Image (cartoon, coloured by chain):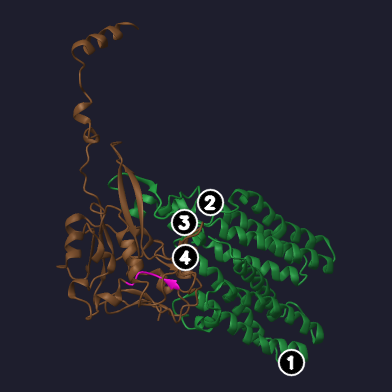
């Protein structure tokens, strides 16, 4: 699948933002007054910035408001609704923390749940797709939630908690890649079932239906960079999990936060790029792509 | 609304006969021609006469070489690929805006282009590559079963079928109602063992493909077969025998 930069920015930034906002909402980052303002503003900036970036890949961003309407069936619509609802619910908590209204933690607790729901909806946009076997697995939502929680804890300067989360995320990533590599074969689709020709024999591509490229090939049969997949996996693992785990455990809070946060975001982007670039869509079968060569 | 109807009154769709299709691409051309006028945004082309042409099509004809399981002679199968108007269409339910919908009256899957935000998720959800985003209009295009032909009373009755069906010179494409057991498409599917594509993905496609009839025999594969087993006679026969002794 084509790794659109806007979608990579969106899912990494807003995932991180919602993770950080959830910890603020739960009251696990105890801040009051102006520090609270800057913490909340930082969380909002990440989440909103990511959401805005996601509209850049739309053909008609001016109609994006329509995407709030189909929450009954569509995970993409649910994500939009959940994101906006969460940001609205958290606003009173942010005001209360900043200006000392003393409104308790109610809005924050509900908002934290909303943060989790939003990230889950983002992941389900991909995990729901049976057409991309690598994504159609529970490890995809687990990984998205893992990134959000780990990123939030790193930015919160949570020390050992951040280390433990980062290590857990590392394990989750390794597991996701392991099951993902066999997912296409396990889905049991091949050119024979795609064409219904299995009774006749073994089909192979004789000639492509068109000599130029098309939308399907550009969007879903994307092949760039897969030969660097192993290197990118190691980079994602080291930067998203390894360095933050060590820095959170060994360094003082501020350096750990800056080094760990920057490293984690970089690793998250590498992982997210691979998440798309490695994902094989079954439509590739019609063009003679076997899972291994996709 | 992007929730799917529990049941549609009709199940309009196509039967595509892979035995008869000669891969002439007439259906591709007719489809592009008809859908460039009238219904929705035109199917645009980019750099059509340049070095890297590309364009939007709702129908593509692949060619596959099929080798029999017993190792006999391979044959070419031409394979038109377009929207199958699935009963459980994943492209409809993923749509965040309600632009994608399946009609309750006849089961046709359509896109309301005025509500399409061009996010592309429906194309990702389709296993069959039936949807292409138009680069010019930036909205999703797909087969409409020529909804602007089949009910169009301004057209002569014989033209009230999809352009691809109307134009097919070998009669490899059939249009009809799969909900009616006595329709041509239902009968063809029963008689010829019409198959759905990738049924394991749970999309319940309406369209059916008729597999090619088994007919070729390896020993008849070459037109020169009767001539290949000739024994040399006369001088040539003597030469053949003598040269055979030389080794």
Residues under numbered marks 2 and 3 in contact, where contact means CB atoms less than 8 Å apart: no
Give the spatial CA distance, label 4 vs label 3: 21 Å
Q: Read off the chain for label 1.
A: A
Judged left or right of residue A284, residue A37 is: right
Among the chains pictured, the one given brown colouring is B
Can you name the residue that lies furthest to the bottom here? A101
The residue singled out by tag 4 in the image is B124
User: Is residue B234 or residue B222 the one in the foreground?
Assistant: B234
Q: Which residue does the numbered mark 1 point to in the structure image?
A: A102
Chain identity of mark 2:
A
- Dot 4 alpha-carbon crowd within 10 angstroms: few under 14, some 14 to 19, many 20 or more: many
Residue B4 falls within the magenta-colored stretch: no
Q: Are marks 1 and 2 in contact (CB under 8 Å)?
A: no
Q: Which tag, 1 or 2, sits closer to the chain's start?
A: 1
Residue A89 location, quadrant:
bottom right
- Counting residues from the start of the chain, the first of labels 2 and 3 encountered is 2
- Tag 1 secondary structure: loop
Q: The green chain is which one?
A: A
x and y percentages locating residue B173 in the rendered image: 24, 61
Give me the residue at 63% from left, 50% from top.
A228
Q: Give the range drawn in magenta.
A: B140-144
Q: Do labels 3 and 1 share a chain?
A: yes
N-terminal label among 3 and 1:
1
Please give the label number shown on residue A212. 3
What percent of the width, then of the height, locates residue A26? 68, 79
């Amino acid at each position: 699948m084509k790794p659109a930069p806007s979608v990579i920015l969106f899912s990494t930034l807003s995932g991180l933002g919602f993770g950080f906002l959830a910890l603020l909402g739960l009251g696990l980052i105890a801040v009051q007054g102006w520090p609270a303002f800057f913490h909340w503003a930082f969380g909002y900036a990440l989440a909103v910035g990511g959401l805005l970036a996601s509209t850049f890949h739309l053909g008609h961003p001016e109609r994006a408001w329509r995407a709030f309407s189909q929450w009954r069936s569509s995970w993409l619509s649910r994500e939009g609704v959940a994101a906006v609802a969460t940001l609205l619910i958290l606003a009173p908590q942010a005001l209360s923390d900043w200006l000392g209204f003393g409104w308790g933690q109610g809005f924050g607790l509900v908002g934290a749940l909303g943060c989790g729901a939003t990230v889950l909806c983002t992941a389900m946009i991909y995990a729901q797709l049976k057409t991309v076997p690598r994504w159609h697995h529970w490890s995809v939502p687990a990984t998205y939630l893992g990134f959000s929680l780990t990123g939030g804890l790193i930015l919160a300067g949570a020390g050992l908690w951040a280390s433990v989360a980062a290590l857990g995320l590392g394990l989750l990533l390794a597991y996701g890649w392991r099951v993902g590599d066999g997912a296409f074969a396990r889905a049991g689709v091949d050119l024979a079932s795609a064409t219904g020709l299995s009774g006749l024999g073994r089909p192979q591509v004789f000639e492509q239906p068109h000599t130029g490229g098309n939308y399907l090939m550009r969007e879903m049969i994307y092949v760039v960079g897969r030969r660097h997949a192993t290197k990118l996996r190691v980079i994602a693992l080291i930067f998203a999990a390894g360095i933050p785990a060590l820095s959170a455990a060994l360094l003082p809070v501020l350096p750990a936060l800056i080094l760990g946060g920057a490293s984690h975001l970089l690793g998250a982007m590498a992982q997210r790029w691979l998440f798309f670039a490695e994902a094989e869509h079954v439509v590739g079968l019609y063009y003679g792509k076997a899972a291994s060569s996709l | 609304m992007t929730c799917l109807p529990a049941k549609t009154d009709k199940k309009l769709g196509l039967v595509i006969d892979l035995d008869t299709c000669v891969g002439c691409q007439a259906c591709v051309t007719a489809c592009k021609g008809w859908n460039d006028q009238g219904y929705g945004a035109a199917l645009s082309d980019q750099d059509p006469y340049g070095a890297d042409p590309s364009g939007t099509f709702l129908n593509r004809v692949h060619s596959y070489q099929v080798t029999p399981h017993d190792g006999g002679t391979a044959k070419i199968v031409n394979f038109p690929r377009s929207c199958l108007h699935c009963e459980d269409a994943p492209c409809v339910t993923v749509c965040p805006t309600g632009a994608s919908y399946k009609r309750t009256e006849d089961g046709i899957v359509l896109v309301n282009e005025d509500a399409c935000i061009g996010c592309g998720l429906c194309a990702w959800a389709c296993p069959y590559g039936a949807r292409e985003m138009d680069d010019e209009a930036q909205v999703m295009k797909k087969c409409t079963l020529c909804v602007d032909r089949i009910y169009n009373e301004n057209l002569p009755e014989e033209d009230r079928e999809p352009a691809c069906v109307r134009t097919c010179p070998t009669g490899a494409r059939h249009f009809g109602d799969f909900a009616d057991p006595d329709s041509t498409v239902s009968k063809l599917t029963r008689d010829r063992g019409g198959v759905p594509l990738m049924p394991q993905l749970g999309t319940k496609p309406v369209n059916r493909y008729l597999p090619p009839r088994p007919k070729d025999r390896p020993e008849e594969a070459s037109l020169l077969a009767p001539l290949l087993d000739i024994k040399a006679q006369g001088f040539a026969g003597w030469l053949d025998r003598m040269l055979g002794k030389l080794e």
